[in-house]
Amino acid sequence: MRLSKMFLAFCLAITVYSCSKESETTPKPQPEPNPEPQLTGKIVFSKSFGDTVGVGIYDVDKDSLSIHNLVEPALNPYYVDPKLLFDKSGYFVTVQTGNNQFGLFYASADAKEKKAIQNTELFTVVSPSPDGKKLAIAHPDANGNYQLFQADISGLNKKQLTSFTRPIGKVNVANLCWSNDGTIFFMSNVDTPRANAYSINPATGHLKKIPNSTGKSMFFTSVSKDGKKILYYHSTGTGASEVFSMNVDGSGTRQLTNFGRLTGDAAWSPDGNYVVFSSDFESPKESGYDNLYIITSDGTPVRKITNNTSGYLWYADWK
């Protein structure tokens, strides 16, 4: 019995010694670092630096940025809401070259091809369909209300999709986006005095207002490609706005930014996991310039993608 206890004690000592040596020589496993997100696609935006304007193209895969000028700088144009084709081969953008004078332009993503689209008087914003065959267009009707139209890719054969009216003032349709199934999402101020987000099926004409429980104008900016979520921004205080996301049925509202500065013009990534937006939160308030940033769909910072120090970067689109 005594020998058995001594043997057990000896074995226990050997075990303890072995474990202690192993703990000294074997490093503890370390948690894996968070991998750099594999972002893809292209981001297009309008760039305005004083008298200099252009369309910016950010190639997410290559982390490279280029600026395109589509018309002569002497015209002092104002570029509005560029939208990429779903295949990322090029983009459409409307250019204001004078008071109530607009032109529609197409450019390839590498800017080697540039052309003006004819018969586009007063097309303030456009967006190409997923199949690249149609355009959603904001265009005035006979009463001067800007309605939603659909046209072919050349801007011809327009078909009016909305017939909004207001008792006071004019209707304005803006911020046009398509989801993958061909539904068009847009913003309108038809519900006085607030702007709200809507969707319409061009094939059936079915119009739907996205519920707005904010009590404020909902400045819709982007729909996820699956058509299930939208991005919008609204004022959160004097001189401040923030970006929010929401399910299209009005549920699941989430605030994505909280800078207390002018933040908006957000767009979903193609996979819906990330958001690009514009904000001036890093600039002195008296300077007023802004930059583009990428966050995750829950608001976690990812990266800053521009290094702007003057002027404005607006109307991001990501495909």
Image (cartoon, helix red, strand yellow):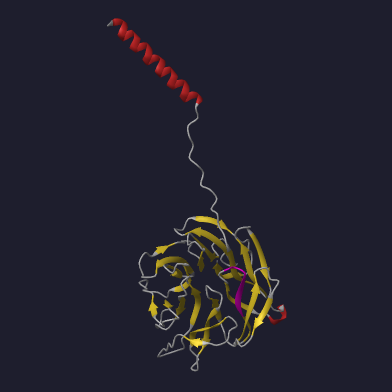
**Residue 283 placed where, x, y %?**
58, 63
Q: Is residue 288 visible?
A: no
Magenta span contains residue 91: yes
| Residue 156 horizontal side relative to residue 219, left or right | right
For image coordinates 38% across by 74% down, the residue present is: 210
- Most foreground residue, 1 or 316: 1
- Most foreground residue, 91 or 263: 91
Quadrant where the image shows the C terminus = bottom right
Q: Is residue 250 visible?
A: yes
- Most foreground residue, 21 or 38: 38
Magenta span contains residue 241: no
Q: Overall secondary structure of the magenta stretch?
A: strand
**Residue 108 placed where, x, y %?**
65, 72
Dividing the picture into quarters, in which one does residue 196 lie? bottom left
Question: Considering only vertical position in the picture, is 62 above or below 229?
Answer: above
For image coordinates 43% across by 17% down, the residue present is: 17
**Residue 40 placed where, x, y %?**
57, 59
**Residue 73 placed where, x, y %?**
71, 78
Quadrant where the image shows the N terminus = top left
Seen from this angle, which residue lies furthest left?
1
Question: Considering only vertical position in the picture, is 43 above or below 21?
Answer: below
Magenta range is 87-94
